[in-house]
Image (cartoon, rainbow, N blue to C red):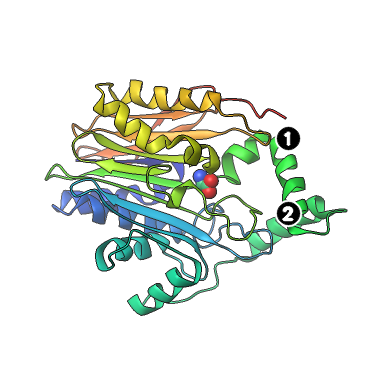
Amino acid sequence: MNIIGSSNARVGLPIGMAVLRKGGSALDAVELAIRAVESNPLDHTVGLGGLPNLLGTVELDASIMDGSTRTAGAVGGVRRFEHPISIARRVMQDLPHAFLVGEGAERFALECGFEETDLLTAEAQEIYQRGLRDGKAGAPHASAVLRAMVGRLAMQPERASGKDAGTVNVLALDGHGHLAAGVSTSGFAWKYPGRVGDSAVIGAGNYCDNRYGAAACTGRGEMAIRAATAHSIVMYLRAGDGPDGAGRRAMEDLNDLEDPYFSAMNCVVLTPEGHHAAFSSEETAMYVFMDESSVEVQEAPRTFVRVAAGRA
Ligand code: GLY
């Protein structure tokens, strides 16, 4: 039994591990661990307290995948619901679909009985306003404001690759040998309204197959979408690489992607044997994990792999 995640999953991992220790499923462990992160108002990259889009509206993306059946559920651009990961799971379980966006996803959430809430905290609003004040000067249209914002982010890699483009990843292996993967995010801060990132795109930010392994990404979602990064990792596992080789190869694939804005990628990998690895395009990034013998959340450095620097 193992559960691993991005650093910000620390608040949820003990909850997920408790599920696994009681004989619960990897899917339940992933969902409950991510719900704890979605409820953390101090995390400005996920759920409640997430930073809003360009117009000041918090839009959430999430996905979940069951490695035993390769069924998946995803939602994109969801407003006013704190737990998109749970809506994604209901999409997977209750509908003949894998992906709902916007108003349809919100309608479905209401039908499922999820409660609406205001996701924009005072702190997130203040960060948003401050950023907008700087980025908005002289740019009357939303797309121009966004270009100005992204230009500024590219100058501030710690913001571009860390807080503002953050996300939560959780992967779990249960006592029955089943894998599950989940991802949840408020996405790229100041994003163009309607932008959906890799977190909601199965194969890009999330992929899981009991036969080979599970993988998930955080960082610049557009890169993971272009390279199908999570699916690539699992396919490299299938081809015979271990988690270290598979993650490294998928990160190196990103080097060919020209990007005029910025480049940033992080991924986590978990195999059916419980071996795990994590990678980052930042030199000092960490990830977190627990196994059945863990008394507390453990932390380890991610392997640094350079991906293409933003090319103007
Ligand atoms: N990786 C999260 C996003 O790009 O929205």
Q: Residues within 10 Å of mark 1 (few under 14, many from 20)?
A: few
The label number, if any, that marks residue 178 in the structure image? none
User: SS for tag 1?
Assistant: helix
Q: Residues within 10 Å of mark 2 (few under 14, many from 20)?
A: some
Q: Is residue 48 left or right of residue 22?
A: right
Res. 110 image quadrant:
bottom left
Q: Which residue position is annotated with label 1?
A: 155
Q: Is residue 264 placed above or below 59 in the rendered structure?
A: above
Place of residue 137 in the rendered image (x, y in percent of width and height, measured from the top left): 86, 53
Q: Is residue 57 left or right of residue 306?
A: right
Question: Could you tell me if residue 37 is visible in this image?
Answer: no
Res. 312 image quadrant:
top right
Dot 1 or dot 2, earlier in sequence: 2
Place of residue 168 in the rendered image (x, y in percent of width and height, measured from the top left): 44, 47
Q: Is residue 268 placed above or below 283 in the rendered structure?
A: below
Which residue is at 36% across, 79% downward? 111
Q: Which residue position is annotated with label 2?
A: 143
Which residue is at 69% across, 55% downward? 127
